[in-house]
Amino acid sequence: MRIVEGKGGYRLVFKKAERESYRIDDMKKRVVIYYKDKPPKTIKLAKIVFNIMREIDEIYVSKSNYSKYILYAVALADKDFSLKSEKEEKGEKVLYIKGIDSKRIAEDRAMIDAEIYAREIANTPPNIATPEWMVERAKELAKDYKLDIEILDRKRMQELGMNMFLAVNQGSDKGAYLVILKYTPKRPKMRVVVVGKGLCFDTGGLSLKPPKHMYTMHMDKSGAAVVMGVIKGVAELKPNIEVWGVLALTENSADAHSIQPGAVVKAYNGKTVEIPHTDAEGRLVLGDTLAYLYKNYKFDYAITVATLTGAANIALGRYVTALLGNNIRLIQHIIRAGDTEGEKLWNLPLFPEYSELIRSSIADIRNIGGWEGEAGTIVGAKFIENFVNGKNWAHLDIASRMIDHEFHKDVARAPNTRTLIRLVLELDKSGKYTKRK
């Protein structure tokens, strides 16, 4: 996609009508979007423009009609996420804008490019995107944006006693890695840690998934992909907020070495954990990761991002991300950032009573609630809360929004990448400088 100062291509105009639609006028080189109440400046506009850009390659938007959702649609229309050997030939998409606000465009584009990058990572098939492949992509990010990077491998995790994380990994012939990418400005106002679940493939372990559910489990690394996109966007926009992107990378495979349902392991923070269900693995990986971070580092906010529970789809469906946590101010910040980016989030409760659902008779806690799936999304977050050591944590369960149903159908969506970048930008505006070691 190219952005050009000036006029060219089909001119985009808005007209009021009884029903919403659009028309491409080839004779007048014009695209008309009809609307009922007012011109859409939401994700609805992006869907309309995306369909338009499937038919034409160049569009002109006046400064008064410009919206980041138009830019978003043009960028997505220009992208082909497939790996086909023979792709349909098409011209590069071009967006013309007269009187362009270069700073605004640069911010919008950095956020959109970050999401598309995250989508590419999340959508890469499992035979390619192994944990080792993800580590190499993280190293490339660190090199390209001059970030500090820290990597713990399986041997180091064994030495540290990260036994929940390793329980998930032990059926795989691939490695387990904890990668920390650090964006550090000269005068950071605060430190925000964003942790992504990176299950490069999830069979469910010995609690094996049905084939139709396993088919998309290369997207179970979407949390880590989102975090990589966030770090890319933040590194380009350079806010005065220190941001760490933490990737919890492994596979959940099924073989003779896999952890057995009913096994009990000791977590990094010393808690004993019963594992009745090996397909509730993301919370095990995130639990040890958070326990390690809280013990060894200081930060103002911690945010986990994961395709954690199928229950999120039952609770909220494909349009909304489930949001939970123990810091209401952070939760409110995230919801506002999502509203700004057209990504809806809904706060679910973490009342103390839910702890009863993960009480174990033989260990401190268990990794699932009841077998009927009662409050599944809340239970998943409630488990993770056991490894949080501070009132500064929020959790995004992006499972229900993992797959794109609106633009590139049936590919990974990497939801809330832009939301979290927007959050950092807003924290930069409102935050005060603090001293930190």
Image (cartoon, grey):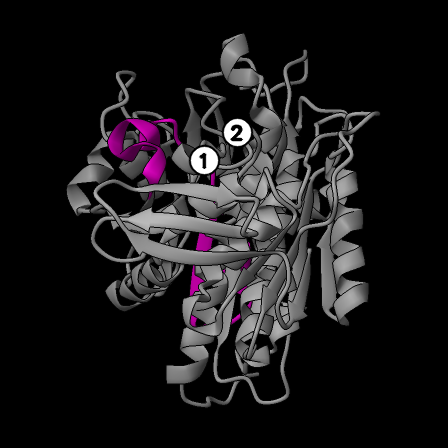
297 part of magenta stretch: yes
Q: Secondary structure at mark 2?
A: loop
Q: Name the quadrant of the N terminus.
A: bottom right
At horizontal 48% and vertical 22% (from top left) the residue drawn is: 279
164 part of magenta stretch: no
207, 112: nearer the viewer: 112
Check disc 1 and report the residue beneath it. Answer: 406
At horizontal 70% and vertical 27% (from top left) the residue drawn is: 126
Give the total number of marks visible in the rendering.
2
Cβ–Cβ under 8 Å for marks 1 and 2: yes
Q: Residues within 10 Å of mark 2 (few under 14, many from 20)?
A: few
The quadrant where residue 164 appears: top right
At label 2, the amino acid type is Lys
Q: In the image, 235: left or right of 329?
A: right
The quadrant where residue 90 appears: top right
The x and y percentages for residue 336 are 31, 64
Where are the magenta residues, as a range?
291-320
151, 154: nearer the viewer: 151
At label 1, the amino acid type is Glu
Q: Is residue 199 above or below residue 334?
A: above
Residue 63 shows in the view: yes
The x and y percentages for residue 343 are 37, 51
Residue 160 shows in the view: no
At horizontal 74% and vertical 44% (from top left) the residue drawn is: 91
At horizontal 57% and vertical 83% (from top left) the residue drawn is: 437
229, 341: nearer the viewer: 341
Q: Residues within 10 Å of mark 1 (few under 14, many from 20)?
A: few
The x and y percentages for residue 261 are 48, 16
Check disc 2 and report the residue beneath it. Answer: 409
Q: Is residue 1 above or below residue 435?
A: above
Q: Secondary structure at mark 1?
A: loop
Q: In the image, 27: left or right of 272?
A: right
